[in-house]
Image (cartoon, rainbow, N blue to C red):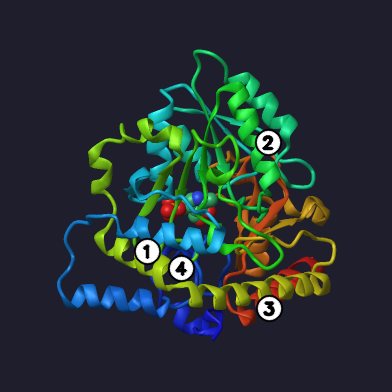
Amino acid sequence: MNPLTQFTLAELRQRTSVKWRMYADDVLPLWVAEMDVPLATPVAEALHAAVDRGDTGYQYGTAYAEALADFAARRWAWPDLRVDRTAVVPDVMLGIVEVIRLLTGPGDAVVVCSPVYPPFYAFVGHDGRRVVEAPLGPDLRMDPAALDEAFRRVGGAGRRAVFLLCNPHNPTGVVHRRDELEAVAELARRHRVRVVSDEIHAPLVLPGAHFTPYLTVAGAEDGFAVLSASKAWHLAGLKSALVVAGPQAVADLSRLPEEVGHGPSHLGVIAHTAAFRDGGPWLDQLLDGLHANRELLAGLLAQHLPSIGYRPPEGTYLAWLDCATLGPATGPTTGEPGVVTDLAGPARMFLDRARVALSSGHVFGTGGVGFVRVNFATSPAILTEAVSRMGRAVNES
Ligand SMILES: Cc1ncc(COP(=O)(O)O)c(C=O)c1O
């Protein structure tokens, strides 16, 4: 059973989350990273059982971390994800903010590889840290020279700085290789920059690629990773995530304020635990469906929008489309990075003329102007209709 084909468009329009409510009913929403899937049966059953027993108090214990550790050992050959080096946090972005607070002070720098997930700018800036960009290379992979240059500017004796790694990378869908991550660890050590790895998309690696947990690479012992079941099992509304400290970051983790653990939802912890513990077969079906959609999208773009650049992602359910050839019709972009709902350039044009909502490239920072991000975690029918509409909008203009 393909989880991506279980709902009709009419059924999806009954939803009340931001993906389905932000735009009018004639718009096909392929923007924010929510999936058009039902819950995995083990997750739904765990939630129903909790409701039946009135188990809706405060979260407690290590079941979530144990389920993740077991999943990581089975799926990613990560043998030593130690439960006593983890902390439950409300969600990935708040976990990242809390870890950055442990490692830096106001005004300190956080390096990101642009273009990257817009809240990296928004949350880091909101917390009084300075975002410094180390743009991806032309192949959309991390550029060691750009990282070296950025780390040199922000790191060094007596200074505190963090590299916020996106592993796998949103919006490009690049899955970093072990050698690339080792190079990151080596550069970070050399310049005394601490690494925080956002691994929320880790379970969503598609056939042909292999996920490497940052904390398993040589030199990453003082790093942090933040993981969650929320992207891969569609649980963003059921708040919880896990911070994992490397062996040399345990003392830092011990300074995490107790109140941070008050934020996660108990029902969220129950759902996320069930996902990592029992949601593997459902995930495999999802990955088959996403792999098929990745191929379908390639065919649809070749047919309807052949001038658009598309490098099929290795992971995530996000496609990063280069619309530069659509030309001046797409309009200039002037907005700042970080505001996920801001629309300009090709994304504005596709909303106005095709009634398809995409994420606008400019909010992903340097390198994003002229791009759109497509969320293809939807049914083949909706994906086909959306790209057909986009093609008509361009070809009839
Ligand atoms: C790279 C990345 N990090 C974090 C998040 C948000 O995670 P959370 O809702 O747990 O804060 C997303 C959501 O799409 C994401 O793509």
The N terminus - image quarter: bottom right
Residue under pointer 2: 183
Earlier along the polypeptide chain: callout 4 or callout 1? 4
Q: Nearer the viewer, residue 4 or 389?
A: 4
Query: From mark 4 to mark 1, how far is it between C-alphas?
Result: 8 Å
- Judge depth for marks 3 and 4 and give the one in front: 4
Q: Give the secondary structure at mark 2.
A: helix
Q: Given contact means CB atoms under 8 Å apart, are the residues at marks 3 and 4 in contact?
A: no
Disc 3 on helix, strand or loop?
Answer: helix
Outermost residue, top side: 158
Q: Residues within 10 Å of mark 3 (few under 14, many from 20)?
A: some
The foreground one among 315 and 135 is 315
Disc 2 and disc 3 in contact, CB within 8 angstroms: no
User: Above or below — where is 191 with respect to 369?
Assistant: above
What is the C-alpha distance between the residues marked 2 and 1? 32 Å
Q: Earlier in the sequence, mark 2 or mark 4?
A: 2
Q: Is residue 89 in view?
A: yes
Residue 272, label in figure: 1
Which label is found at residue 335? Answer: none
Question: Which residue in the structure is indicated by mark 4?
Answer: 233
Instruction: Name which residue lies at 41% across and 23% down.
Output: 105
- Ranked by sequence position, the earlier of labels 2 and 1 is 2
Query: Looking at numbered disc 4 in the image, what kind of residue is underneath it?
Result: Trp
- Residue drawn where x is 61% and y is 56% of the image: 211
> Between disc 3 and disc 1, whose residue precedes?
1
Whichever of callouts 3 and 4 sits on the residue coming sooner in the sequence is: 4
Viewer-nearest of discs 2 and 1: 2
Which image quadrant: the C terminus?
bottom right
